[in-house]
Image (cartoon, rainbow, N blue to C red):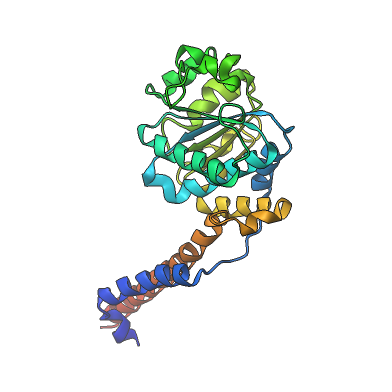
C-alpha cells in the first residue's frame, strides 16, 4: 500500500477531487446545519424590525465571489420581502450591477405583489469607492439623482423625501472586499449609529469580527454561514423549502464538505509517506 500510494499518478488525485465535487452536486447531497449564535443575531436584526422599515442593501461584490455571496444576498432579499421592508439596492462595484439585478429578479418572480418604487428601488452603481459613502451619509440625492433605470428619484415614492443613509433602520452589506463592509462601518455604522449586518467572503470575515457587537451586529462568513442563515429562515418561514433556489447555500455545502474532507485525507497520506521515507533514509 505504501509503495502504491507513493507512486500513484497524480491524475488519479485530480479524478478523485472531480468526483468529490461532482457526485454531491449530481445527487443533491445536503448535510444538516446548526446556526451559530452570530447567524441568529443577523437573522434577528432583519426579522425583528417592524414591517416596512427602511433597509439599505449595499451589494458590493462581483461574479468572482458569486459562489460564496449570492446565496446570502438572496436570503437577505427574501427575508426583507417577507417582512415587507423598504429595500434600497445599490452597489459600489462596477460588476455588482448584475448581482443587484439578480436580486431584483427574485422579487419580481417570487413577490410580484411588491411594487417597484414603493417597496423596493434599484439605485444602481456609482463610482468613487468610499467617496460615495462619505457623500450619501449626509446627502444621498447629491449623487443619486436617478435610479438605475434613469427615473428621477424625486418621482419615486421611496426616494422622494429621502435625505441620507442615516435615515435607514438597517444597513445590509454583502461584500467581497474593497470597497465594502469596513468602509460602511467606518463612515456610516460607527460614527452615525446606523445598525449594520454584513455578509462576506471567508477571507474577509475575520477582519470584521473585532467590530462585533458594538459597530456591527453580526457577520455571515462565506457559504457555511449562508447555509446556516437559510436554515434559520426555514425555521421561521417553512414555505421557503418549496422555493427553488432558496436552499442554494445548503446545496453548495455538500460538495464543499466532501472536497475539503478529501483534501485533509490527501494531506495526511502525503505526510505519512514523507515521514516513512525519512525513517527509511535514516535507517540506511
Residue at point 40%, 69% (across, down) = 22
| Closer to the camera in the image, 175 or 263 | 175
User: Front-most of 125 and 174?
Assistant: 125
Q: Quadrant of the C terminus?
A: bottom left
Q: Is residue 228 above or below residue 155?
A: below
Residue 164 visible in the current orientation: no
- The answer to which image quadrant residue 277 occupies is bottom left
Along the viewing direction, whichever of 104 and 199 lies nearer the viewer? 104
Is 91 situated above or below 14?
above
Instruction: Answer whether residue 115 is visible to the viewer in this image.
Output: yes
Q: Is residue 117 above or below residue 64?
A: above
Residue 200 in picture, x, y percent from top left: 50, 42
- Residue at position x 59%, y 55% in the image: 243
The residue furthest bottom is: 1
Q: How many marks?
A: 0
Residue 231, position as x, y percentages in the image = 64, 55
Q: Name the residue at 45% across, 64% down.
A: 260
Q: Position of residue 141 (x, y in %)?
A: 50, 14
Q: Position of residue 244 (x, y in %)?
A: 55, 57
Instruction: Pick whichever, 81 or 284, lies toward us.
Output: 81
Q: Residue at x 54, y 46 (%)?
A: 109
Please tell me whether residue 101 is drawn above or below residue 70 in the rendered image. above
Left or right of 84? Residue 74 is: left
Q: Assign the N terminus to one quadrant of the image.
A: bottom left
Amino acid at each position: 500500500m505504501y509503495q502504491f500510494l507513493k507512486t500513484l499518478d497524480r491524475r488519479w488525485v485530480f479524478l478523485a477531487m472531480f468526483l468529490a465535487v461532482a457526485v454531491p452536486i449530481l445527487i443533491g447531497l445536503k448535510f444538516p446545519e446548526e446556526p451559530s449564535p452570530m447567524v441568529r443575531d443577523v437573522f434577528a436584526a432583519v426579522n425583528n424590525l417592524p414591517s416596512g422599515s427602511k433597509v439599505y442593501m449595499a451589494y458590493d461584490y462581483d461574479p468572482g465571489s458569486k459562489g460564496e455571496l449570492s446565496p446570502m444576498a438572496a436570503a437577505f432579499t427574501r427575508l426583507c420581502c417577507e417582512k415587507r421592508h423598504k429595500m434600497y439596492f445599490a452597489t459600489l462595484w462596477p460588476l455588482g450591477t448584475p448581482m443587484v439585478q439578480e436580486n431584483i429578479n427574485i422579487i419580481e418572480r417570487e413577490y410580484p405583489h411588491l411594487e417597484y418604487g414603493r417597496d423596493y428601488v434599484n439605485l444602481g452603481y456609482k463610482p468613487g469607492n468610499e467617496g460615495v459613502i462619505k457623500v450619501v451619509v449626509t446627502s444621498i440625492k447629491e449623487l443619486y439623482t436617478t435610479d438605475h433605470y434613469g427615473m428621477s428619484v424625486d418621482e419615486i415614492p421611496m426616494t422622494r423625501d429621502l435625505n441620507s443613509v442615516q435615515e435607514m433602520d438597517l444597513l445590509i452589506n454583502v461584500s467581497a472586499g474593497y470597497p465594502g463592509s469596513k468602509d460602511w462601518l467606518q463612515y456610516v455604522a460607527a460614527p452615525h449609529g446606523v445598525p449594520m449586518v454584513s455578509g462576506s467572503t471567508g477571507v474577509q470575515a475575520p477582519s470584521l469580527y473585532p467590530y462585533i457587537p458594538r459597530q456591527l451586529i453580526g457577520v455571515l462568513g462565506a457559504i457555511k454561514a449562508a447555509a446556516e442563515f437559510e436554515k434559520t429562515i426555514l425555521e421561521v418561514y417553512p414555505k421557503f423549502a418549496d422555493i427553488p433556489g432558496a436552499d442554494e447555500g445548503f446545496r453548495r455545502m455538500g460538495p464543499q464538505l466532501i472536497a475539503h474532507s478529501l483534501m485533509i485525507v490527501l494531506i495526511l497520506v502525503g505526510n505519512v509517506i514523507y515521514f516513512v521515507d525519512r525513517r527509511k533514509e535514516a535507517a540506511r
